[in-house]
Image (cartoon, rainbow, N blue to C red):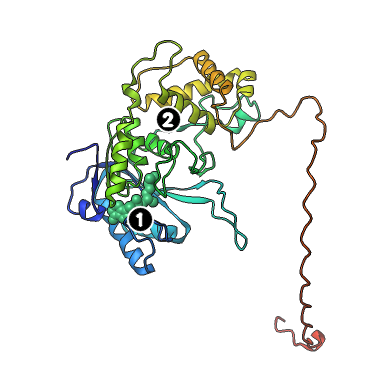
């Protein structure tokens, strides 16, 4: 089969009758919540959407290699259905990951949605690819407690992923597709669930995030997408991606932009400030090992020293290119007392409308006269 391409096609029609070819499938279908896509109509009746989900999941399962992994992104409304269809197809659920992000949109009558479900299935529960070292992060024992028992190699992230913000309209990564996922989320999935050279397939390629991540991390890729316009834009996006492995040895002190992006991503997920890395050299050593594992799993033969990592982080910090750590912000608990900041005056609250009086409670029979049925 011809690999490393995106095809304008209906995924079901394109997949039907094919032999297994995919080592990893990442599917992010339309969630049936009325999103505006180029050609797809995203508000179907429940039964129609359910039947369609069964069909595309079944054909994806058919093309998954025996040791393959199948990740599905889905919203609240159909997460349970996807899990049950997975069961029916004989897939094994390994994790039900919640990707949590904060969302700018305000709600007044219910809590704002701020997560997506990532269901992680495998075909064979005993034989699958899982590279824990490629995605490790700091444990609390390392980060917070300075505990000597901490594993210097860090720990696997939990199944709630809070470290990847949604792509805002202003982010440079944005392509204009209405539902583009951040590459950082896909990088974690591709790194942990496939090997360099494996085939990654995305039936709903959208803006091409999965394919871009796969190409960057030296995997082969195939995607299908219904919209001709999206396919064009994916092709343009993929042309800009160079596999990390092909970037070649960087002369001392000169980093390729993709290695810098990987370091920035690791810094964000490790969630330890440069101040802490400076004061805890063991953490810097672990971060260096994590970075080297990460790029080794992208097919890159190069390794970096702690000194090089530190110098690059400092350089990025000075240029304000490190981003804001969202979780475990490690502000030092000691230090000089700080004066109370000036708090702005609160705007006057509008007058509350008068609440209607609660209706009088009906007369209740004297409990003493009610027979005790429990005796
Ligand atoms: C939620 S978006 C995928 C976004 C993608 N994960 C990304 O990060 O850019 C779903 C995409 O599926 C496409 N689509 C809908 N039905 C399809 C089908 N039957 N075959 C292929 N693509 C389809 C839509 O055009 C849309 O671009």
Residue 158 vertical position relative to residue 280 in the rendered view, above or below: below
Q: Is residue 112 left or right of residue 128?
A: right
Q: Where does the image place residue 321, in percent across and percent down from the top left? A: 54, 27
Q: Position of residue 314 (x, y in %)?
A: 56, 19
- Residue 38 in the image: state x and y as whole percent: 34, 54
Query: How far across and how far down the image is residue 112, in percent?
Result: 57, 55
In the rendered image, the vertical position of residue 186 relative to residue 316, given as above or below? below
Residue 368 lies, with reference to residue 99, above or below; the image says below
Near-viewer residue (172 or 294): 172
Of 242 and 366, the residue lying toward us: 242
Residue beneath the point at 21% across and 55% down:
13
**Residue 209 visible to the viewer:** yes
* Figure disc tally: 2
Find disc 1 in the rendering and name its residue.
Answer: 86
Q: Nearer the viewer, residue 14 or 84?
A: 14
As drawn, the residue found furthest toward the top would be 252
Q: Residue at x 29, y 51 (%)?
A: 227
Q: Which residue is mark 2?
A: 134
């Amino acid at each position: 089969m011809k690999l490393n391409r995106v095809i304008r096609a209906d995924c079901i029609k394109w997949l039907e009758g094919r032999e297994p070819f995919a080592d990893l499938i990442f599917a992010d279908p339309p969630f049936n919540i009325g999103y505006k896509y180029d050609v797809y109509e995203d508000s179907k009746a429940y039964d129609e959407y359910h039947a369609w989900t069964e069909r595309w999941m079944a054909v994806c399962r058919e093309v998954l290699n025996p040791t393959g992994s199948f990740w599905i992104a889905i919203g609240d409304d159909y997460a349970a259905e996807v899990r049950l269809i997975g069961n029916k197809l004989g897939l094994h659920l390994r994790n039900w990951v919640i990707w949590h992000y904060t969302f700018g949109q305000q709600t007044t009558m219910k809590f704002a949605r701020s997560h997506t479900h990532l269901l992680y299935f495998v075909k064979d529960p005993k034989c699958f690819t899982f590279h824990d070292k490629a995605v490790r992060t700091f444990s609390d024992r390392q980060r917070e407690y300075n505990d000597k028992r901490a594993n210097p190699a860090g720990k696997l992230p939990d199944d709630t992923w809070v470290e990847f913000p949604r792509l805002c309209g202003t982010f440079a990564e944005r392509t204009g597709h209405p539902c583009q996922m951040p590459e950082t989320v896909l990088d974690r999935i591709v790194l942990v669930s496939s090997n360099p050279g494996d085939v990654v397939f995305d039936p709903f390629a959208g803006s091409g995030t999965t394919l871009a991540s796969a190409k960057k991390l030296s995997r082969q890729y195939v995607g299908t997408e219904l919209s001709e316009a999206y396919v064009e834009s994916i092709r343009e996006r993929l042309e800009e991606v160079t596999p990390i492995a092909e970037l070649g040895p960087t002369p001392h002190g000169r980093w390729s932009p993709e290695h810098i992006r990987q370091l920035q991503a690791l810094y964000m997920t490790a969630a330890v400030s440069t101040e802490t890395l400076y004061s805890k050299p063991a953490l810097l050593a672990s971060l260096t090992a994590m970075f080297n594992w990460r790029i080794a799993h992208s097919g890159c033969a190069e390794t970096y020293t702690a000194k090089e990592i530190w110098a690059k982080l400092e350089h990025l910090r000075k240029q304000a290119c490190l981003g804001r750590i969202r979780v475990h912000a490690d502000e030092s608990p000691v230090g000089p007392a700080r004066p109370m900041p000036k708090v702005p005056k609160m705007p006057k609250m509008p007058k509350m409308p008068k609440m209607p009086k609660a209706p009088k409670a009906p007369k209740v029979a004297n409990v003493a006269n009610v027979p005790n049925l429990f005796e």
